[in-house]
């Protein structure tokens, strides 16, 4: 029985080591779960949308609910102009949601509990949104850092704060998800360890905590996927509609 | 900002603890993760973009179309029903008006007819009454003359029987006329 709560996050190579150029692209347990996530999403949506019936079955209804949930999220936060980015936001939401949820199954690997994964997603979003902003507004996109109605005296300070907050977006976005996932899983592991070490006599209390935490973590898994997607929508809204 | 601090803190913590710390900060695992993330995420994006979104938007739009079509049909039918109801009400009102007119006309006609017949009847009755009255007065006159004559003859005979004197009829008649007038017997 492993006692180190961080052991679950170790990335282990499965099969041979593959090096492309200078970069190691070996298939790992993380990659395995990414493949599982993508496969599950693909199977779920292809099966559930196969019939396209007028009166949806349970699976089709679930698929449509997810679709409409994300569609509503985008139109509420970023408006109709964000319509072309809908497939990307939906992909993002599904990938994060399924990664988080599958990670809740014991002995699995949580893809999103690695900062490098969440940061890679966040930095792509950051650059994507920035490019969209500059393409749409040109150099005027820099006005984003100049909020309206601020006294001229305060402006230098405000601009610095705004630039820093803009640049820290990918960090806050990625760390929020990664930290939540890692903390939750570590905590579950710690309480699980207590159950084992205290045994039949005192193990019931941490077991109860574990059960409660599992429920909480499932909620967090959904919530963090939602937050990740909605923040992307908000950043997209800033890039599409330049107003403060 | 606070996330940055957390990150920096965790980086330094990881450096201090080397391998024993967070596996997330082991740079050896970053390459494969980033590579596989981009690969799988791109595949998922293509699946979502080319299959999931078109299929779902299709079926949702189809359903919305179906619902809006049905709603339109229902609206149309409701309108038709309302129109039909209106025309029914109009017809009913017209028929009622006509019926009322007919009733009024009939009443009028009947009243006129009744009045006419009544007048005719009254005229007829009036005439009959007048005729009868005439006859009565005629009969009255006749009977007075008869009475006078009878009284004259009787008086002449009585006087003759009693006195043996014959008195002319004219004289008797005058006396009777005078008596009748004096005694006011109402036989005039």
Image: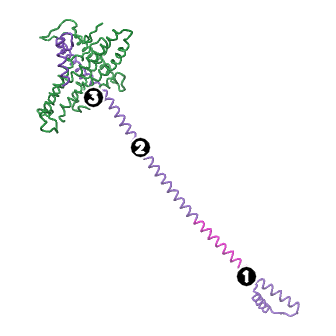
Chain colours: A green, B purple
Cα–Cα span, label 1 and label 2: 87 Å
For this view, does B65 lie left or right of residue B168?
Answer: left
B150, above or below A57, in the image = below
How many C-alpha atoms fall within 10 Å of the one at disc 2: few (<14), some, or many (≥20)? few
Between circles 1 and 2, the one closer to the viewer is 2
Q: Which quadrant of the figure has residue A4?
A: top left
Report the residue at 83% width, 86% height from top. Answer: B154
B44, above or below B77, in the image = above
Same chain for the residues under marks 1 and 2 in the image: yes
Q: Secondary structure at mark 1?
A: helix
Q: Secondary structure at mark 3?
A: helix
Give residue B141's mark.
1
Q: Which quadrant of the figure has residue B124?
A: bottom right
Same chain for the residues under marks 1 and 3 in the image: no
How many C-alpha atoms fall within 10 Å of the one at disc 1: few (<14), some, or many (≥20)? some
Mark 1 belongs to chain: B
Q: From which residue to which does the magenta span run?
A: B115-140
- Seen from the viewer's position, the closer of residues A34 and B111 is A34
Mark 3 belongs to chain: A
């Amino acid at each position: 029985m492993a006692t180190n709560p961080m052991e679950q996050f170790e990335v282990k190579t499965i099969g041979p080591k593959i090096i492309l150029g200078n970069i190691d692209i070996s298939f790992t347990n993380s990659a395995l779960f990414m493949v599982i996530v993508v496969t599950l999403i693909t199977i779920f949506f292809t099966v559930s949308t196969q019939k396209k019936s007028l009166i949806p079955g349970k699976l089709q209804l679930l698929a449509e609910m997810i679709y409409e949930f994300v569609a509503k999220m985008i139109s509420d936060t970023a408006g109709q102009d964000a319509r072309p980015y809908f497939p990307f936001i939906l992909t993002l939401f599904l990938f994060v949601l399924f990664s988080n949820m599958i990670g809740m199954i014991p002995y699995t690997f949580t893809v999103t509990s690695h900062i490098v994964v969440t940061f890679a997603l966040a930095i792509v979003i950051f650059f994507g949104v920035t490019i969209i902003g500059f393409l749409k507004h040109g150099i005027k996109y820099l006005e984003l850092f100049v909020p309206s109605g601020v006294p001229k005296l305060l402006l230098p300070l405000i601009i610095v704060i705004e630039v820093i907050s803009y640049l820290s977006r990918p960090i806050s976005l990625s760390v929020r998800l990664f930290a939540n996932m890692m903390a939750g899983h570590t905590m579950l592991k710690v309480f699980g360890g207590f159950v084992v070490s205290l045994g039949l006599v005192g193990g019931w209390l941490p077991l109860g905590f574990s059960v409660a935490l599992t429920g909480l973590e499932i909620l967090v898994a959904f919530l963090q996927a939602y937050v990740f997607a909605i923040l992307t929508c908000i950043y997209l809204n800033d890039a599409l509609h330049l107003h403060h | 900002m606070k996330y940055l601090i957390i990150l920096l803190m965790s980086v330094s913590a990881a450096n201090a603890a080397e391998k024993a710390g967070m596996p997330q900060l082991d740079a050896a695992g970053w390459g494969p993760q980033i590579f596989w993330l981009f690969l799988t995420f791109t595949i998922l994006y293509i699946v979502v973009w080319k299959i999931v979104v078109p299929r779902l938007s299709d079926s949702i739009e189809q359903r919305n179309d179906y619902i809006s079509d049905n709603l339109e049909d229902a609206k149309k039918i409701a309108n038709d029903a309302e129109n039909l109801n209106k025309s029914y009400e109009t017809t009913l009102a017209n028929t009622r008006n006509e019926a009322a007119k007919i009733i009024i006309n009939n009443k009028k006609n009947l009243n006129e007819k009744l009045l006419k017949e009544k007048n005719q009847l009254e005229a007829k009755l009036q005439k009959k009454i007048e005729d009868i009255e005439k006859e009565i007065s005629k009969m009255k006159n006749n009977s007075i003359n008869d009475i006078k004559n009878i009284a004259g003859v009787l008086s002449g005979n009585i006087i003759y029987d009693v006195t043996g004197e014959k008195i002319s009829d004219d004289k008797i008649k005058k006396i009777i006329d005078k008596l009748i007038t004096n005694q006011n017997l109402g036989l005039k």
